[in-house]
Each structure stands twice: as structure tokens, then as C-alpha cells.
Amino acid sequence: MRTHTRGAPTVFLIGLLWPLLAAAAAAEVDPSGGIPFMGGNYNGHPMLYFNRGDVEQLQYAATGTHRDMAKRIRDAGETMLEQPEMYLPPWSPAEFSARWNEVYGNNLGVLSMFCMLYPHRAGALDLAKDYMERMAAQPSWLVKDAPWDEVPLAHSLVGFATAYDFLYEYLNKGQQERFLQVIGNASRLMYEKSYVRGWGFQYLHNHQPTNCVALLTGSLVYMTQGYLQEAYLWTKQVLSIMEKSMVLLQDVTDGSLYEGVAYGTYTTRSLFQYMFLVQRHFSISHFDHPWLLKHFAFLYRTILPGFQRTVAIADSNYNWFYGPESQLVFLDRYVLRNGSGNWLADVIHQNRVVEGPGQAGKGQRWCTLHTEFIWYDPELIAKPPPDFGTSQLHYFEDWGVVTYGSALPADTNRTFLSFKSGKLGGRAIFDIVHRNKYKEWIKGWRNFNAGHEHPDQNTFTFAPNGVPFVTEALYGPKYTLLNNALLFSSALPGSCFKPWAGQVTEACDSKWLKYKAGLAADAEGRVEAAMERQGMVFIRGEGQSAYNPELRIRNFQRNLLLLHPQLLLLVDHIHLHPDSPTRAMSAFFHNTELPFTGTKVDGVHGAFASHGEDRYKMFWMDDTGYSSKAVLGYWNYPRGYPYNGSNYVNVTMPLRYPHTRVAYIFVGPGVEVQSFSLRGDDQRVDIYLATKDHMYTIYLLTGELTSKPLFAMVLMDHKKIVFEKGAGAEDSSPAEVEEYVNVMEDNLQHVKPVFQQMERHILGRVLNTANFRKTAERLLQFTDKRKTEEVIEKMFAMSKKQGKGAAGRKVNLGETLSESLPDIFAQIEVNEKKARQRTSKRTYEDSPEEGGGAFVEYADGRKNRKGAFVKGRRFKEVHMVATAESEGLSSTASYIRLFLLLNTATFFLLLAVLLTRFQRGRSLHTQRCFYTILLIDCFILLYLFSSCSHTQC
């Protein structure tokens, strides 16, 4: 027994240390993302993204770890200094509002960051002050021709409020008060409009986070200046909107955004600011959100070879509207923690187009530089994802998009292929609408906005060698023929281009897609297969449901088969009902830059686009051997669109009952096609294709019921590649988030304790000062006027008292005065609810499509208004913990840190004594006592580790 016990310390040591190591590892998983919670304890400005004490560290980082980003900020600032007349807003209100003016707010953020990092740069602060004076002089930040759109106002507000926060100490007293009034007026207008405009209730649309973050930024600045009641209402309204969006976003399982990559970066520019701000100021964490965990793929898997362009699905430019470097460093720091975000941001910046198609817009190019600087973590060494350098197939199951060959260096045989066939608005939104999910919030398509989407089911793009050969047509009219899709001959009414009928969502007389009602509301496509086998890629989509049922199309099946990086086969299979009126199909293929030229080889018509000395060719033929001559041209866009138009190839072919197959081949300069033919029957179509290097025989099974469980089989020379049906794409919609209303309400309840803490601090700062009465009036601004005077007199009298506690301790008068106030937030909340109930019915009756924004009330289960936490129905306690600069966290964290150090030292001291002094000659009872003491100390250490993690000590 004695011998056995003496051998125990090693095993026992491992047993003790293992849970400690596990606890330490668990402590590293921080739901806050490492962002300290302010807890309502502010020391003036800046406070939005960092504190006054952080400024010196940021200035130091600008000369070291952040020098590359700092150089971009400095270059932007110097450019504005060199030509101020080009960048300063006009004094004239007519000129300011004459055109879309988001550029003024966008540039002000980076200018204020430039001034903060380089405060001694001559002229910089004067330029920033002049900039703000000009903006403050405007009676409105709206655009004259679009007074119903608050987006320009939002850009101005977020830029102006951020500059106010960054440069507060450099403004004189008059500017501080005047600029604050401007922020208040703009925020007040945004708040009012949030109840009647679409952005208040149309979720996951780019306008919503843009406008909400502007209002949140304004309200945080207003809150810091002591206007608590209004700021409380504004903040609550923002969170009641955005927290619903965060719940709904959980249904998007692939990390995508249905508006496409370009508008996706517009959304995430503000959405990521929202996530940061609500964590910092209200301890609401979204960094483990399932959508956020997948979002890196949305940026990484959509980039064409060369890192200059993206798949331009939906309204788009050539790549990104905002960022994406800022979004990528945010993802890396707060979500990924593996260096991939920093790496991709760096590669994109290195390959940026300076002049020509794909260059950043002048109104957006500098907008995210300051957040990129703030969020960048230099400790995350830039490192590409493990699969970088190889072509990968990726399927966005919610978006309905397949990509292949993304994020590669531009080189020969570096090929990009994309395909789109999905549900209108994406699977999540479509299923929410059609399955009546989240019915407490959602009333059909009214709560979403798919206006930026295109009639583009069963469309594709192809970039062999990274050269865009078949492209999307970018931001243009919502016509089917401006997408790489099919039209069918028809005499149906309502067609935009008779006698041709496009997809039911196309809009003939609007800039926005049809989606709200009728056939358009139910439009969808479907990816049936997406797979790679031995270097070949097969994709199949079904688009019949995107067309009018009166066309009597049974199937519109589009098959893509990438046989070689420079050889793509596309086969359209159209199966008609016996009574179908359509007798022809018309296919369009686009290139926004390169014009097409017609050609003909051995009776087969085709077209080519020249890129330098290389020719990229396409040919087509149906299953009878017929090949029609195409119409080539350029489609000019109407005025009001950012692009002039698109080059196109239009191929029209006859349709036969019951089915017709048309094959197209797209060939890069490295492949020479020698022969091309096809024939088919009811079940399949066989394509024979010979190039200089290989002979291909493709068996494509198109029937609904096939003799073999295959999509296709390819014989290349003596090699067989099979695409089996068992590997087809699956479509399974996620379940509704459990107790989704409570999830939102629980997060909303983080807000009131912060404002109550602000109330205490404000009163504590002005005790026995001349500003006391003015501050009290500001706090009670929206309280009953008769009661206000009584409360102020009582508070004023109390402030003159210098009391001592019963135990001789000094009484915290700020706390006492705060307790003497009525619940100023509950009062204004009740008043606001009554006012909204009176107006909401009238608003809805006047405009049922736009009105009806609900006033969301906090569930307040606390008994003590001034308590340190508040409980909701399922709510975990919200502990009011301040940052390291504030008293609360400073003392708590310091004590925990001290006890943790002392206990760790004690543990290892006892362990050393046990191993050195008690190994021999001690009784078994004594050793067991020591083991027990060590075990108790181990549990104490675990508790301290947990406490340290919560308080971020």
C-alpha cells in the first residue's frame, strides 16, 4: 500500500493540472471577442470605438504594426489637404442636396482618423473643422430628388458623429454644442422615419444596417453628452430592429447575403460596426453567430483569379462597394483567429485596380480605412487557408450559387466558373415567407426587399485563365435578357419584349425586381447537382419555376460540364407540355467589356471575344445538328444606371415537342476544337467533342426517370468519369429559431442598466457645481413638466448636503440622487408607446406597404430599478461591469487578478512541498491531507479562472 501511494503524486499531478489547463483553454474562448464592455462608464470622448487613453497606443501603432494601414489613411488625408476644394462639402444647400451625397459622410470618418493619428499635421484639424462646419450649415442632409431615402442622411450622420467623437477635444465650446445639436436633429429624424420607412421592417436589406448604425452612432454620442431619455429611445429602436435581423440571419446557413457580394459589403460595412458597438457598449455578443462563422467563404469563394473581381450576381460593380479589407480583418480578429482574414485583405489590397474597370469608387474608397485600422490585429500572422492554390468547388446552399476556381493567382488554366439557380431572396427568406416562419414579426414579402436581385435563375459566368469571357451585366435594368439566361417565344401579356417572355420577376418599367406579389413572389430555381470528379466539374440547375406557368414548360434544365480549364460544355434541356404555346427559345451571353465577333466553322455558327492576342470562342448546335446565326450587339442602359451597358451574343433556336437540347461550347486559346456533334433520345443526349489533345464522349442523362442513377458520364480517351445521382445537392431549410422573441428581448434588456449607470455618473460629476440644475433638466427633459420642478428642487437641496453614513463612510450622493429620480426611462417609454399606438394605425391606413413599425417594449422583471442586474423571461443576468478605466471593473478585476496570482503561487508551493518533502517518511494520512488541500486549491483556481474570464482581467 505504501509503495502504491508513493507512486501516486505523478498521476495525481497530471489529474490536477489537466482541468487547470482545460480551464485556461476555455477561458480563451471569449464570447466578447476581447472587446471590453464599457458598462456605462465613460470618461468623455472618444468613446465609440476606443477611449481617450487608447489614442496614444493607436498613434504608436501607426508607426509600427499598423504602418501600412496608417499610410493609406495618411495618403487619403494628404490628398484632401492638397485639393480641399474637391473634397469639402459645398456651403450651398442646393448644391449639397443636388446629387447623391454619401461621399461627404464617407470621407469625414477617415479625415477625423487622420487628424487623430497625426494631430500635429499642419492644416489637418482646420480642414476637418471646416468640413464639419459646412455640413452643420446644411438644413438637411437628404438628397433633393430622393427625399424619401434616408441612406445619404445615414452616411452623413455616421461620419459626422464619428468625427465629433474622435475630434471632440479639438473643438471649441461653441462647436461642441452646435455640432451636437446637428447630431441630435439628424438622429431624431432617423428615429421618426424608422417607424414608417421600409428600412425599419425590411430585414437583411442593405439599407437597414446602414441607417440603424447611423442612428446608433448618433444616440451613443448623444447619450455621452447626457441626453439620456432620447438616446435611450433611439438605442432601443435600433436594437429592436437589428436584433430581429440577427435572429433571422441564423436561417442563412452558408454565410451569404442574397443581394450579392457588392451589396453584401455595403451591408457588412455597417453590420460589423453594429456588432462591435453593441458588444462594447451593451455587452451583446454576436461573435459566435452561425452566419458569421461562415461569412469568410462569401468573400473568399467569390473572387475571380487575380483578386480584382468578384462574381457579380445581382446589382453589382466589378467587385466590392465597401472594403472588404475592413470586414476581413474584423472576421479574423473576432471570429476566425487564424490569419486568413488578414491574408486575404492584404492580397486584395496588393492587387487593387488603380485605374479602369474595377477601381474603387471615389465615394467609397476611403470609407472603411478607419475601422480597418481599429480592428486589425497584428498578432494574427497573415496565412492563406489550407486549400489555397488549388481550384475548389463551393456550393452556397442558401444563395443558390456554385463557384469553382475562386481566389487564385491569375495564370493559364486558372479558371473561374459560377452558376446561379436559387430561391428568390435566398432560401432562408423565401422559406420564411412561404412557410409562415417567425410569424410574430414577418407578414410575407412586406418584411423583405429583393429589389436588387435579377431575373437570373439558371445563369452562369465563365472566366478561363481568369479572363472574363461570359460575365454578369452588373447594375442594370432587371431584364432577363441582360442575364445569361433564356427567353421563350410567347404571346402572353405583360412581357417586356414581345413576342418573348422572360422570367416572371423581370421589371419592364422599374429599376427594381418584381417580387412582392403574383407569380413573381413564388419564383425560384434549384441547383440539382454540383460536384467535381478527377478535375472535371458538373453542375445542373432547374429553372422552370422562374417562368410563367402558361408557357407550359415542364423542365428547363441547364447542365454545365467543365471538361478542361479552358473547355466548358453547356447543355440546355427544354421539355414542353403537349399544349405549350412556345415554339422558340432565345439565349443571351454577356461581356461587359469585350465585344463579340461572329464566326463560322464547318457550318457551326459561333462568336469570339479578343483579349490581347488571344481569342475566346463559343459555338452552338441543337440535337438535330442545326446551328443558327447569332445576333451580336451592345445593349445600352438607360440614364440613371452606373454602367453604360453590355456586349451580348443572342442565339435563337426552334423548340420541338416534347424536348429540345441545345449545346454550347466555350473554348479558351489553349484548346483547339476539331469536331463537335450531338444526338439524343428520350432519356439522354450524347455529345461528341474532339480537341487536338483529347477525344470526349459525354453521356448526359436528362430524363426525370433514368435507367441508371447517373447525372452524366464522360469518356476522355480511355478514362471514365462518372457523376452519380447519389451525390446531388440537398435542400433542407433550417428550423425556426427556438423562442426567437425571447432571444431578441433578452438582448434588448442589456440597454437600460447601461443608461441607468450613465445617469448615476452624470449626477455624480455635477454635484455642487453650477451645471447641476442644467444637467438635471436635461435628464428630465421628457418627463412631466410639473413633476420636473419638484424633483429638481429636491435634488438640488440634497446636493448641498454633505452627509456621512452610519458607519462613518461617505454617502455616494450620485447614487442617492439617482435613486431619488423617477424611473425616467420607464416614463418616456410608456409615453412613447402611447404616442406610437395613436399614430401607427393612421400611418398604416395611409400607407399599408410602408407603415406599421411596431414599438417594442422592454420586458422588465426587476424589482429594484437601480439594481446591478435585470432579468427577463429567459434572460441571464446582465452584470454591470465597466471597462478597465472605470472604477467597477478596475477594482473587481484587480482583486481577482491578485487572488489568482496568490492562489497559483500557493498551489505550486504546496505541490513542490508534496513532491520534495512528503515523498518519503510521512504517513499515508498526512499525504492524503495534502492531496485534499491541493484538490480544494485546484477548485479555487478553476473558479478564479472563470471569474477572470468574465471580468476580462
Image: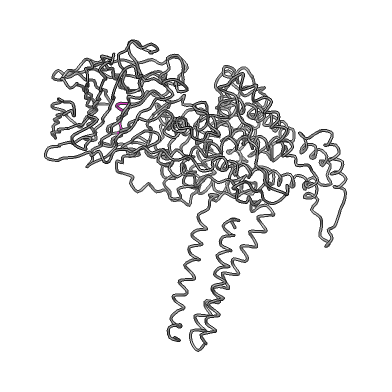
Quadrant of res 145: top right
Quadrant of res 158: top right
At which x and y percent is residue 65?
Answer: 50, 49
Near-viewer residue (523 or 922): 523
Please give the name of the residue rendered at 35% of the width and 22% of the height, measured from the top-left corner: 483
- 896 horizontally vs 576: left or right: right
Residue 224 vs 902, above or below: the answer is: above
At which x and y percent is residue 550?
Answer: 34, 16
At which x and y percent is residue 854?
Answer: 61, 31
- 72 horizontally vs 216: left or right: left
The secondary structure that most of the magenta stretch takes on is loop
Within the magenta stretch, is there residue 366? no
Quarter in which the C terminus is drawn = bottom right
Near-viewer residue (689 or 193): 193
- Which region of the structure is painted magenta? 466-470
Please give the name of the residue rendered at 54% of the width and 70% of the height, measured from the top-left corner: 938
- 586 horizontally vs 428: left or right: left
Quarter in which the N terminus is drawn = bottom left
